[in-house]
Image (cartoon, grey):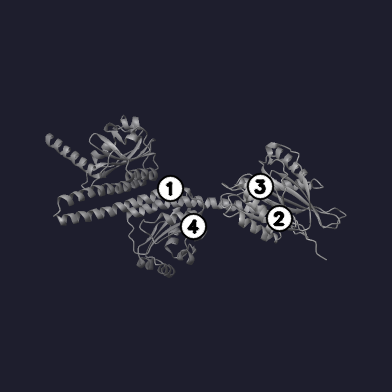
């Protein structure tokens, strides 16, 4: 009996070695096996994962992630360091929360040398049921393995087994065709089995690929449109759904997120659904569970005529609706639709449910970002001044937000009349400001609002309203108050001349791009005089101001650097283009002039916010 036992064990080892050679796996990196290791790491969130197979005198690792050197470079471990042997010996999973507390493993070299503390390994078998190795998840800390995690690991092991069997069967089929040419029936059967297993393996790989892509693609999303775009691309090739819809909850309704790139008839017809509507998606939301409708008969039996008519018009037969769970609430529903009847097996449903978890995380992040951006944009818009009515002087402003919705800038413009002298009955003077606070976030927009108000107050508190005096007072206030001020601005005053149609421009420039002045004959001058930028660390600074006469019909153009400053573009060239545009089109109505300049210089969409502000002095009427 002992001799027979040793002979049976030797035969088993020999059969395992033959199967391993047919699989073509060695102590070298294998793309498919590395993919399974990465999936185990991502799905179970463990730092280390193996596809391990036991050779004659060592454990080879064709698929690894997280293993330290020198073992990672060798792609092999001595049998003394192998926990895979326990899986092979029993043919059953090995699940250990803390190997240090396990009598079998507390002094095992794998624990002491490789820092394997928590271990979960599932057997990998060939077509004959021989255990060739294990698919293992490893943590360096004690860990209680949840049933769902072990189920996910078991599903991934099944897909890995299918891949191993496919490789082994491919070798067997080739050998059979070479050696047994006359055994047509047997070869045909082998081919049929191989095709079936290949389909199973491909389905497993497709599902594994979906989870890997979902974890990678959806981790980088921003707004809901970006999530919708990536969801559309994510499900290509996995069950080949005809349509994947993303619906987000808002009070008592579900709002369909429209695809930003492709126009779908689904989204043209139904963009909003009341939660009370008799649709599969609304049922999934109301009952907070997955809803599966296999065919039209089930749809007719369980839903209202509105849903049946909609699905008939769209050409859908099967639909799976999965709730999207956020960290605190149910966010919406993922609707996956097939034109032909589609059987959704246990493995596919588990894969799609896992993928919906990644989508829910992306939706939750996008809703949070969209809400913050919306609030910041509203705050910024509220702080941009409505232009005051003017008598004779023409003024116009244009604000262009950055192409990146996340960039909330500190660009602003301001204009207001100054108090008239008691004995004056003519036109009042006009203060204009264009500025840019450093930063592209809510903080920058808040600082911008504070600086704008402080500058207004500093101006009105210091008659006769010198721009330099107001900026000096602003510097002094910022150096004392806890306002993190940093940026540039131009502060200017336009005064009508007594007894003349001329005006006078007085300005002070705190490090801002130079204003442009166009005379009625089309000549454009850059007003390059300037002082240092606005920064609280510089303390009170003696600002200077400058004057220019403005003939009737003169145009003053102020702007922020987002108009002329771009990555990989020369700023001087952009300013020269701006000068040429103002010279050529400066006699057009100001609204049209600003749009023309913005369309020419802010195309493609600007990387920073852009403010354009123009003032034109009255033209003297011809007698």
Looking at the image, is mark 2 or mark 4 nearer the viewer?
2
Q: Report which residue position mark 3 lands on.
A: 436
Q: Tell me the crowding category of disc 3: few under 14, some 14 to 19, or many 20 or more residues within 10 angstroms, Cα based.
A: many
Residue 305 placed where, x, y %? 42, 70
Q: Position of residue 613 (x, y in %)?
A: 69, 54
Tell me, for residue 614, which label it has, or none. 2
Which secondary structure, mark 1? helix
Q: Earlier in the sequence, mark 2 or mark 3?
A: 3
Q: Are marks 2 and 4 in contact (CB under 8 Å)?
A: no
Q: What SS does tag 2 mark?
A: strand
Residue named by callout 4: 248
> Alpha carbon of mark 3 to alpha carbon of mark 1: how far?
37 Å
Residue 578 percent location from the top left of the image: 65, 53
Q: Nearer the viewer, mark 2 or mark 3?
A: 2
For marks 1 and 4, give the one nearer the viewer: 1
Answer few, some or many: residues within 10 Å of disc 2's Cα (few below 14, many 20 plus, some between 14 and 19).
Answer: many
User: Marks 4 and 3: CB-CB under 8 Å?
Assistant: no
| Separation of marks 1 and 2 at Cα, in angstroms | 47 Å
- The residue carrying mark 1 is 216
**Relative height, residue 298 to residue 183 (above, below):** below
> Given contact means CB atoms under 8 Å apart, are the residues at marks 1 and 4 in contact?
no
| Distance between mark 4 and mark 3 Cα atoms | 37 Å
């Amino acid at each position: 009996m002992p001799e027979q036992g040793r002979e049976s064990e030797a035969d088993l080892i020999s059969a395992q070695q033959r199967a391993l050679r047919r699989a073509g796996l060695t102590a070298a990196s294998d793309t498919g096996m590395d993919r399974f290791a990465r999936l185990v790491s991502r799905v179970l969130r463990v730092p280390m994962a193996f596809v391990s197979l036991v050779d004659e005198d060592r454990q080879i690792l064709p698929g690894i992630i997280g293993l330290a050197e020198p073992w990672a470079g060798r792609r092999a471990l001595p049998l003394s360091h192998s926990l895979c042997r326990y899986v092979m010996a029993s043919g059953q999973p090995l699940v250990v929360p803390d190997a240090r507390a396990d009598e079998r493993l507390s002094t095992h070299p794998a624990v002491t040398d490789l820092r394997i503390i928590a271990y979960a390994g599932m057997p990998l078998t060939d077509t004959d049921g021989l255990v060739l190795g294990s698919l293992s998840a490893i943590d360096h800390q004690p860990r209680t393995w949840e049933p769902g995690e072990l189920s996910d690991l078991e599903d991934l092991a099944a897909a890995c087994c299918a891949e191993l069997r496919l490789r082994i069967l491919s070798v067997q089929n080739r050998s059979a065709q070479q050696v047994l040419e006359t055994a047509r029936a047997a070869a045909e059967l082998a081919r049929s089995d191989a095709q079936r297993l290949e389909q199973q393996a491909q389905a497993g790989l497709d599902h594994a690929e979906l989870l890997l892509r979902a974890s990678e693609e959806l981790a980088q999303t921003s707004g809901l449109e970006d999530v919708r775009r990536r969801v559309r691309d994510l499900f290509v090739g996995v069950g080949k759904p005809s349509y994947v819809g993303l619906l987000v909850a808002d009070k008592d309704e579900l709002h369909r997120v429209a695809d930003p790139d492709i126009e779908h008839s689904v989204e043209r017809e139904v963009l909003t659904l009341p939660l009370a509507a008799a649709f599969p998606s609304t049922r999934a939301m109301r009952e907070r569970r997955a809803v599966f409708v296999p065919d039209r008969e089930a749809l007719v039996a369980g839903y209202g005529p509105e849903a049946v008519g909609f699905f008939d018009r769209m050409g859908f037969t099967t639909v799976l609706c999965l709730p999207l769970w956020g960290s605190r609430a149910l966010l919406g529903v993922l609707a996956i639709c097939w034109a032909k009847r589609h059987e959704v097996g246990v493995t596919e449903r588990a894969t799609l449910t896992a993928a919906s978890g990644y989508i829910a995380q992306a939706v939750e992040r996008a809703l949070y970002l969209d809400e913050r951006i919306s609030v910041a944009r509203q705050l910024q818009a509220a702080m941009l001044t409505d232009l005051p009515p003017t008598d004779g002087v023409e003024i116009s402003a244009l604000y262009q937000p950055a192409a990146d919705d996340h960039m909330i800038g500190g660009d602003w413009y301001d204009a207001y009349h100054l108090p008239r002298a008691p004995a004056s009955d003519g036109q009042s003077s006009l203060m204009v400001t264009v500025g840019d606070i450093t930063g592209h976030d809510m903080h920058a927009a808040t600082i911008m609002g504070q600086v704008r108000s402080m500058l207004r107050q500093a101006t009105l508190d210091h008659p006769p309203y010198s721009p330099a005096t107001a900026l000096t007072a602003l510097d002094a206030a910022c150096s004392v108050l806890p306002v993190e001020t940093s940026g540039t601005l131009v502060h200017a005053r336009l005064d009508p001349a007594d007894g003349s149609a001329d005006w006078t421009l007085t300005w002070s420039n705190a490090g801002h791009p130079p204003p442009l002045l166009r005379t009625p004959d089309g000549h454009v001058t850059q007003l390059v005089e300037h002082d240092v930028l606005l920064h609280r660390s510089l303390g009170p600074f003696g600002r200077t101001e400058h004057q220019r006469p403005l003939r009737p019909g003169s145009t003053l153009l102020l702007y922020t650097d987002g108009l002329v400053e771009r990555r990989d573009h020369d700023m001087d060239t952009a300013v020269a283009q701006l000068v040429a545009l103002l010279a050529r089109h400066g006699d057009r109505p100001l609204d049209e002039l600003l749009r023309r300049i913005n369309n020419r210089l802010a195309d493609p969409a600007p990387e920073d916010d852009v403010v354009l502000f123009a003032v034109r002095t009255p033209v003297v009427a011809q007698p």
